[in-house]
Image: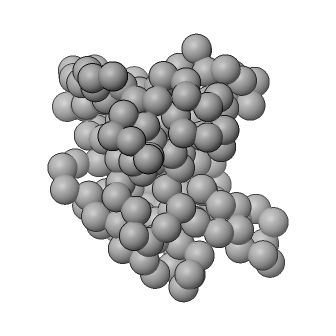
Amino acid sequence: MTAIPITGDTTTTSGIVGRLARSGRFEERSKLTEGTTTKIGYAMTFGTTTDQVKPLELGTDKFAGIAVYDLKASDLDNLKYGDKQQINVAHIGSYWVYSEEIVNEKDDVRVRIVDDGVDPLKLKYNFCKTASAGKTVLLKGVKWDSNTGLVGASAINMSDNIEVVAD
């Protein structure tokens, strides 16, 4: 399968996880999911083959982008994609993600790779700002694109050359 990049310049302020958050340049690639754990808005890494992606889980993973919202998700009620389902993965632009913490534009962007174990709301695959050794990874080159007063949908801005750094 050949990845077909989708690019454009559009505006949205929906606050829906996995959707565009702001006008400006964006780029998405078509990929296949690997496994059944992919949810809309998750940070993704590359799978076993170059045409596959799976949720980011290790400090050594390479960032592939964000799983984009699509009405064709196999389990839309739970915002979930099935195994080997075609999805778009955004790797440039401003997109809504789920943040487990209140964030502002100056905070680092991280992804939880392990459940917290103490706080039941700090779950694997959530975006966050607070480093936790062995439980989160820093997405160097990604910035929060909004200030939020509540836990929930927050916008991130992705650009070229994003690096995953283990905490």
x, y percent for residue 155? 43, 45
x, y percent for residue 98? 58, 48
Which residue is painted at 71% across and 68% down in the image?
115
Which quadrant of the structure image shows residue 12? top left
x, y percent for residue 45? 42, 51
Position of 1 with respect to 38 (left or right) is left
Which residue is painted at 53% across and 20% down in the image?
70
x, y percent for residue 160? 18, 49
Number of disc labels = 0
Which residue of the protein is positioned furthest toward the top in this rendering? 72
Which residue of the protein is positioned furthest toward the bottom in this rendering? 133
Which residue is painted at 33% across and 22% down in the image?
1
Position of 51 with respect to 141 (left or right) is right
Asked whether residue 89 appears in the rendered view, the answer is no
The scheme the figure's colours follow is one colour
Eyeballing the image, is 162 above or below 20? below
Asked whether residue 46 appears in the rendered view, the answer is yes
Eyeballing the image, is 24 above or below 54? above
- Name the residue nearer the viewer: 116 or 147: 116
Which residue is painted at 19% across and 56% down in the image?
161
Eyeballing the image, is 80 above or below 141? above
Which residue of the protein is positioned furthest toward the front in this rendering? 49
